[in-house]
Image (cartoon, rainbow, N blue to C red):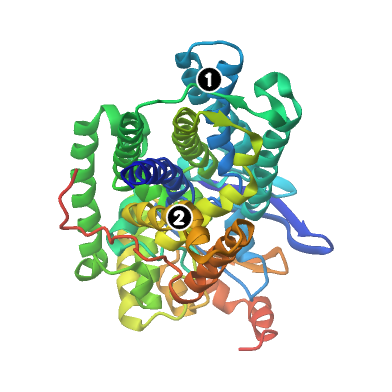
Amino acid sequence: MIDFAIFAVTMIAIWSVLGISLHLQFGLTGLVNFGQVMPFAVGAYGAGFAAAHGLPIAAGIAIGALLTPLLGLLVIQPAGRLAQDYWALVTLGAGEIFRLTMLNVPAIAGGVEGTTVYRIADRSLAMLLALALLGAAALLARRIGRSPLGRILRVLREDETLGATLGRNPFALHRLVTVVSWTLAGLAGVLYAHVVGYLSPGAFTVGETFLIWTAVVLGGPASLPGVVLGTAVVELTAVSTRFVAQWSHLPFELTANLRLGTFGLVLVLVFLFRPDGLLREAKARSDADRR
Amino acid sequence: MLIAADIALSYGELHALRGVSIAAEPGRILGLVGPNGSGKSTLLNVLAGLQRPDNGNVTLDGRTIPPGLPHVAAQHGIGRTFQVPRLARRLTVLQNMLVGAPPPPGESLWHLLFRPRQVRRHERALHAAAMAMLHRIGLAHQADDYADALSGGQQKLLSMGMLLMGAPRALLLDEPAAGVNPALIARQIDLLRAVRAEGRIVVLVEHNMEMVADLCDRVVVLDAGEVIASGTPAEIRADHRVMRSYLGEPA
């Protein structure tokens, strides 16, 4: 049981970093990104590439951490010319292109067979690393969220044209937030690879993007604690599915599908009754302490 | 001097502007009137870089403003308010006022992470300036309310205040008085007089002829995308062509 708890906390922490990454892009800035799994996969495959080619672990971390912001810049580029909804489709497509490339080009990291990566044997250490990454991501997101930068990002979320007529280049700010957000997701991916010890393209489908979105929408996209809360709920539900399967004697396939259905239902209910999520954005008061 | 020279813009078959030229001088308020659909808002959009004209160009104090780039036009000192005020509605009144100012150092990630003291110092000064502006427009008691909670007239005042926070060289105002109660209109008039006295350029689109007559030094009349008259408010009132163009419009 304690092993499971450690595993669950590790996974919640890693996925919370992804949630925070989406919080920055969507919750603060209003950018709809349906390819959120991509930077995560890129980070993980940085580690996978290093492992498959006999490079040191540090090289994998460097590849993952440097490639994600670069790909972020590439993927955000069309957003300068596209309406937001179309950009959502671009990100969806980009995520799939990356996954299919990993699937079909075994030279990178084993293709469909996947690849094994150095697995952190000490599970408590893995958990501590995950919590440390989560802490750093949360601090960074908090710093941005409560700053003048966070303020102008929220203005873009509310009304992009307003931001532009106030002399800010919306595209430059979108680019900045995408680079920061994707770097965080990439680092989460690197750590994920070393926690799990094995990578295959099947772990980075649109379904994972859907999972992160469910967590963020449920918890409250614009609230940092909300995002972590939502991720905890969704991830606990996800990892405990097998216990439910054991306990209920239903076939595993069925419980997995029921789980997806439940998430869909949760999304619909949240949109209907709690559109801002469980935790709302805190109001910035003029008498609050100034940092 | 803000000059629009020979601006033409059409939406397919519809010619919204057919070679319009206007010149707005510093320390003067230029009124822009005309029936609905005559091209006033489109002209403001072109001046503010929100729409790219098919022809013509905009210059401010001799510098050409690149077309179709609203943030660049704003950086050149052209600010605009909208008929339906654009505000960050889920932010507080004060927060809106704060973003009216030119970008502070705290909007750069580098400064946030590595120059926190400078960010804090600048923020304190900015807060003071924003509160002062809120006092000036009479909304200080609502600083912590969501912008969405303000009345329509207050929202227009707030967007005018945000514009003033940026201290633009040229202010383009799109029907600031429409749907606003007389007490708030009086406040707007005081503000605009002060802005004029500071030597800024003001272009005022307004249907409220009393306000136009009261404030404007010169008036340009647009109809169907063309300038049909220009002169002092008194001259315009005496011009029968103008009256005809207005009479054609249902009240």
The vertical placement of B89 against A105, above or below, is: below
Picture coordinates of residue B111, whole percent (x, y): 31, 30
Which quadrant of the structure image shows residue B157? bottom left
The residue labelled by disc 2 is A240
Q: Which label number is shown at residue A63?
A: 1
Q: Is residue B49 visible?
A: no
Which quadrant of the structure image shows residue A278? bottom left
Taking the image as shown, residue A194 lies to the left or right of residue B185, namely right
Quadrant where the image shows the C terminus of chain B: bottom right
Picture coordinates of residue A182, whole percent (x, y): 50, 36
Disc 2 on helix, strand or loop? loop
Amino acid under disc 1: Ile
The vertical placement of B138 against B172, above or below, is: below
Q: How far is the residue under mark 2 from the one under mark 1?
A: 33 Å
Which residue is at a point 36% across and 39% down the rendered structure image? B107
Callout count: 2
Which residue is at a point 57% across and 58% down the rendered structure image? B44
Taking the image as shown, residue B43 lies to the left or right of residue A267, namely right
Amino acid under disc 2: Ser
Q: Identify the residue at the far bottom of this view.
A: B251
